[in-house]
Amino acid sequence: MHIGWPETDIMILPGVEITTCLGHFNIFGCTGAPSQLLDIMKEAREEDIWKKMKYSIRECEKNGWLWSINHPFLHIWKWLYYDLPLKHLHLMEIVNNPTCGYAPEANDEAVSFLDYLWKHGYVVFGLGGSDSHNLESERYEGATEPSIPGGAEGYGRYFNSLC
């Protein structure tokens, strides 16, 4: 959980990203650390991780916290919790850091999946995320732009290409 933010005009929501071998998700608007967070980080067995993830999702719903699946189709970090009931899904990252070489293809898959969900009556909101893990001076392989929180350049071009 971040304790400080860069100077920006972008609205910042408090939250946490939970990263596991089976996928990543964000919790937005949390007023404290999810109760299973440290246990999730310590677990190695996929079955145990999944149980704690389900508990965390229920905790989000109980506390009114929003949660999202992050970059569900992005290479090695894609979402692998296949038995998650879709009725529990409210947010999904459909655009993740277009400065990362293989992100545009994964983003296209996420947009198509969101469209599929809408066609079948699910109410799921799409999100765009910086998911920045680099210093401003660093670049992903093949990227011409930095991956920084709120970096808009690559996103604008990506969204324009979707329209």
Image (spheres, rainbow, N blue to C red):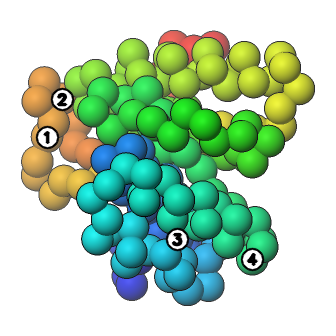
Can you tell which quarter of the image residue 110 is in? top right
- Label 3 sits on a secondary structure element that is strand
Please report whichever mark, 3 or 2, sits nearer to the chain's N-terminal start. Answer: 3
Q: Which residue is mark 4?
A: 63
Of the two numbered discs 4 and 1 on the same chain, state the one appearing first in sequence: 4
* Residue wearing tag 2: 143
Left or right of residue 150: residue 81:
right
Label 1 to label 3, Cα distance in Å? 25 Å
Residue 121 spot, x, y in % from top left: 88, 26
> Tag 1: residue type?
Arg
Q: Is residue 80 visible?
A: yes
In which image quadrant can residue 59 be found? bottom right
The answer to which of marks 4 and 2 sits earlier in the sequence is 4
In primary-sequence order, the first of circles 1 and 3 is 3
Where does the N terminus fall, quadrant-wise? bottom left
Question: What amino acid is at disc 2?
Answer: Ala
Which SS class for mark 2?
Answer: loop
- Marks 3/2: CA distance? 27 Å
- Marks 2/1: CA–CA distance: 6 Å
What percent of the width, then of the height, locates residue 40?
39, 67
**Pick the front one: 46 or 108:** 46
Looking at the rendered image, the disc whose residue lies closer to the viewer, 3 or 2, is: 3
The kind of residue tagged 4 is Asn
Disc 3 marks which residue? 15
Q: Residue at x 83, y 32 (%)?
A: 122
Figure quadrant of residue 104: top left
Spatial CA distance of label 3 from label 4 is 13 Å
Residue of label 1: 139
- Callout 1: 10 Å neighbours few (<14), some, many (20+)? some
**Relative to 13, is 22 above or below?**
above
The front one of 135 and 65 is 65
